[in-house]
Amino acid sequence: MERANRRAISREYFSKDRLAEHHFRSFNAFLTRGMQRVVDEKETIDTDIGDKEGEEPVHVELGDVRVVTPRVREADGSEELLYPQEARLRNITYSAPVFMEMSIVKGEEGEERVVDSTETKIGRMPIMVGSEKCNIAGFSDEELIEIGEDPADPGGYFIVNGSERVLMTSEDLAPNKILAEYDTKYGDEIQVAKTFSQRRGYRALVLTERNREGLLEVSFPSVSGSINFVTLVRALGLESDEEIVHRVSDDPEVVKYMLENLEAAEVQSQEEAIETLGKRVASGQGKNYQLKRANYVIDRYLLPHLHEEGVEEEDVRINKAYYLCRMAEACFELALGRRESDDKDHYANKRLKVSGDLMKDLFRTALNKLARDVKYQLERANMRNRQLSVSTVVRSDVLTERLEHPIATGNWVGGRSGVSQLVDRTDFMGVLSHLRRLRSPLSRSQPHFEARDLHATQWGRICPSETPEGPNCGLVKNFAQAMELSQNIEDEQGLKRELASMGVKGIPGLEGQGQETPADD
């Protein structure tokens, strides 16, 4: 009896639904929520119509997006349901039409009127075999055999031009997390705290380093060189010395280090700090432009992940200043030997991008390309005094090409290559291995000994023996059989409330909500 139970459990555990389950879950989440989020981020497509005098401005508002199940358009114009086996045999792409609500709006703000509003086909999206939008989802083994499908096939891949392509899970350093380490160029003399700040597909590396003189400097995109730490936090709204020191730390040793920084400070007020920053980011320009550019740079490029919908710009800036103070504290703790240097190879400091995340990046760039094309078509139609309508300005092959080509070639957005690969059909185990493979973004040509080594935190997550020989050794890995991949937590506020109910104090976003903290037992 016990042996039978064990067999039933193992059969269930290693079932075909489980082995590629992380791909399905991620892709389904992308179809149900991810696509709509990308569209909501874009919200509108602005045009240059209205720049001339006496001309009414025009823009396009984007609404709900939906994907149907895969179809094929025949030569006579009819549309039929498409099954994976037919796509393989006919060398066509297993993709489904994508529809989006679009409205062309004319007129100044407050006097806007909708010229044309309709749901239109914007392109075709390749669909993962076995996902919820797949035509064979939920079929029994007998029904699958009847239409020529293999009941044991695990799915989890795409079919583009008849080829089966799997998206490789990619491993990366965790974004929006402070990592403190020593700068390898200078040995133990320079302490660095860094964060890969990520929002809406844009990734900015923010570095806070303590140089040989013990002074803190911050560097971030669009500003050449580094900026004095005190200057930057003052520009963000933390003006008084006391407040800056208190926000970094109340520890006497750290306060001593901070006083050195404050004595060497170049500026004493927020206005001076922004002026100094303006001279750095727009040297040689007029003062007004310098101030405008300085404000734009700190709002756009500094710690973009701290931007939240509906939060005032001043509050966002203060949050950025607090975050920089936390990074400064990490540098000082490292200098005082209070903490170890963070281990980049520790698996808690890694995040995995699965099919849905990769498709979201792809869809974002494809939608931007479509938006540019719609803008161009609208301006051209307006110039020729034609009637503006949604159906004539949307060319669906723009989006389709941007979605299919990267999956067909493996050349992804952001200059990455080898993201999609031809499914290894040598044998059944080869297919399963390929679906559960993950790759590191590190260069194959450099040693990277630590990154290739087996790390203790990979126990139970990564297979210790399945890795290629040669240049890919340790960079291409495979999931352990019993590995379960957790996904991003959608309900962030719910998580914060749960933590508060457990007695965690000072959770951002929950202050002043009458949150009761239970007394310690």
Image: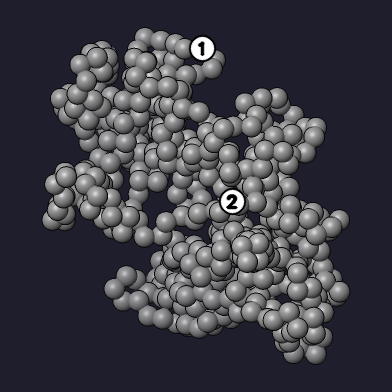
User: Quick check: can you spot residue 6?
Assistant: yes
Question: Tag 2: Cα neighbours inside 10 Å, few (<14), some, or many (≥20)?
Answer: some
Task: Identify the image quadrant of residue 6.
Answer: bottom right
Give the mark toward the camera: 1 or 2. Answer: 2
The residue identified by callout 2 is 483
Q: Is residue 237 above or below residue 139?
A: above
Task: Tell which circle, 1 or 2, labels the residue nearer the N-terminal end.
Answer: 1
Q: Which amino acid is tagged 2?
A: Met
Which structural element holds mark 2? loop
Secondary-structure class at tag 1? helix
Check the picture and name the quadrant holding the N terminus: bottom right
| Residue 86 image offset from top left, x and y in percent | 81, 78
Q: Is residue 26 above or below residue 351?
A: below
State the residue at coordinates (69%, 69%): 129
Is 416 left or right of 253, judged from the image as shown? right
The x, y position of residue 164, in whole percent, is: 78, 63
In this picture, is 223 found above or below 353? above
Say which amino acid is labelled 1.
Tyr
**Which mark is on residue 186?**
1
The residue at 42%/76% (across/down) is: 105
Residue 283 at least partly seen:
no
Few, some or many C-alpha atoms within 10 Å of disc 1 (few <14, some 14-19, many ≥20)? few
Task: Name the quadrant of the C terminus.
Answer: top left
